[in-house]
Image (cartoon, grey):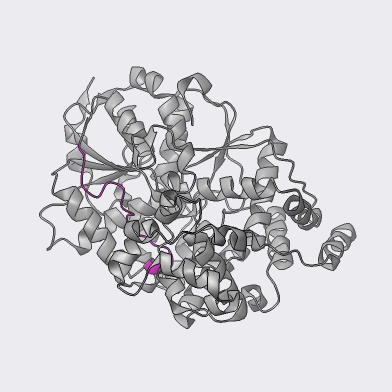
Amino acid sequence: MLTSAKLPQRLYLFKSCVAGTFYPGIERSFRFILNSLNVDYFDDPNQSSCTGFAGHCGVVPPEANLSLNARNLALAYNSGYTNVVCTCPTSYANLKECIRELNDVNTKIAINNVLKAVHYEYKGGVTIYHAAEVLYAMREVLVERAKLSLSQMNIVTHHGCHYTKVFYDEVTGGLWEYPTLLDEICAAFSGTLIDYSERSLCCGLGFSHLINADEYTESTSFRKLESITAEEPDLIVTMCAGCQFVLDRFQRQFEERLDRVVPVLNVSQLIALLLGADKSRDACLQFATIDVAPLLEKMEAV
Amino acid sequence: MNQEKESEKEALSLESPTFEFLYKKENLIKCLQCGRCTAGCPAAKVFSDYSPREIVRRAQECTADELAKDPLIWLCGQCYTCNSRCPRNNTPASIILDARNKAFKEGWAPEELSEKASLFFRSLANKGVTLSPELFKQEPSLFNKLVDYNKLATLRADLGLPPLNARDIPVPAKALNEIRTILKLTCNKGGPFDDH
């Protein structure tokens, strides 16, 4: 759990393969925000993906997952930037789970034997955060810097299962069954938050289900989107590129079955826009399937 | 280079560690079959024959091999709702994940999923990233045909981003060799790394 009293310094940015592929504005926006506040961070090209997407399909064995991430965590530790910040909840949960497993002495010895071959040693000493937790901790300063507000905006949030349901007792803001992390951030910028019936339901991604194109993704994402659109919000705010992919792209698929479409933004993109980021170069809104332009008109100058 | 080869040999010569931390019988014994996992499970809502409670019961009674061959393990969406709702701190999603790992290792995974999911594995070995735009050039149907590679590549090129890689800056060669070495050491013979 992260509060403003414990704002982490020297951040090690952990890359997201889904964000990097489909929504580059998520990572660009987060860096824009950190640059605006002169926060010291390290954008290390040497790290590997956390393997999470493939891991949940079952194709990457746990030995490989643990060893690659022990190397990633050793890279962060050796750099002196020991506060690892993930934009992806699957990376967040996966890295935390790896740390938990590496706390077992025998597992740590076995993994360090693998790492010997590439001249690394996992020593611990690293903390994992999600980018939304960092934004939450900085929200008061961010509001002071904001050029635009959300006062004319009705917003729903979706927090992402791998943030709320894996390490459910470590959720910042609210409880895992009713997380309010994103709600509290949006409320700080004067947004109006709306509840919806399927708030805690998975977006429908389902990893292997998205690949199989089976009923799970279509049925679950429709159930989720139907309950969101019924409340007629202006915006869906997420903290996961995978959830964003499903909620953004499947709305186009369901166009004839849903009464309306609702733009989807990652919380980093939203805050960067409020701080005055460029909508194309920084927030990369052109990558959205559902047009975000109507939203920009609703953002009022402070 | 020689030193690297020696270290690799040393690591390989160690008895292969077992990582059955996701499938611990002592955790399974704790299950009281209350069904809270199934009540909250989005996959159980979609597939009438799927129930995480039932998977845990099977895991208690059958062997790891039998569970890995059960087609029901591929119906879980890995959302971990079962993890958060279990009053005994069990994680049916992790038991299923362990069974899936075993299925991939033994060649029991469904063929189509195996082919497509192996693309992630190759991407990890070739680029250091699990997912990249290149995969949608190779396999346009990878994500339910929701991704138009040409459109994605154009948008990325307009921003000055590499059209095939998820990274602004590719993983440097030395780091990529380290990633490949780790994959070679940790993916058992018969696993997907044999393709390389």
Q: Is residue B188 left or right of residue A181?
A: right
Q: Is residue A71 left or right of residue A137?
A: right
- The residue lying at 57 percent from left, 54 percent from top is A49
Toward the viewer: A54 or A178?
A178
> Height in image: A244 above or below A215?
above
Magenta extent: A194-209
Toward the viewer: B94 or A190?
B94
x, y (%) of residue B110?
A: 47, 80
Residue furthest out toward the front:
B32
- The residue lying at 35 percent from left, 17 percent from top is A144
- The residue lying at 13 percent from left, 44 percent from top is A232
Q: Is residue A205 magenta?
A: yes
> Height in image: B58 above or below B30?
below
The prevailing secondary structure element of the residues shown in magenta is loop
Residue A280, by quadrant, is top left
Count of numbered tags: 0
- The residue lying at 43 percent from left, 63 percent from top is A207
x, y (%) of residue A142?
A: 38, 23
Q: Is residue A46 visible?
A: no
Q: Is residue A33 magenta?
A: no
Image quadrant in which the C terminus of chain A is located: top left
x, y (%) of residue A132?
A: 42, 36
> Height in image: A194 above or below B150?
above
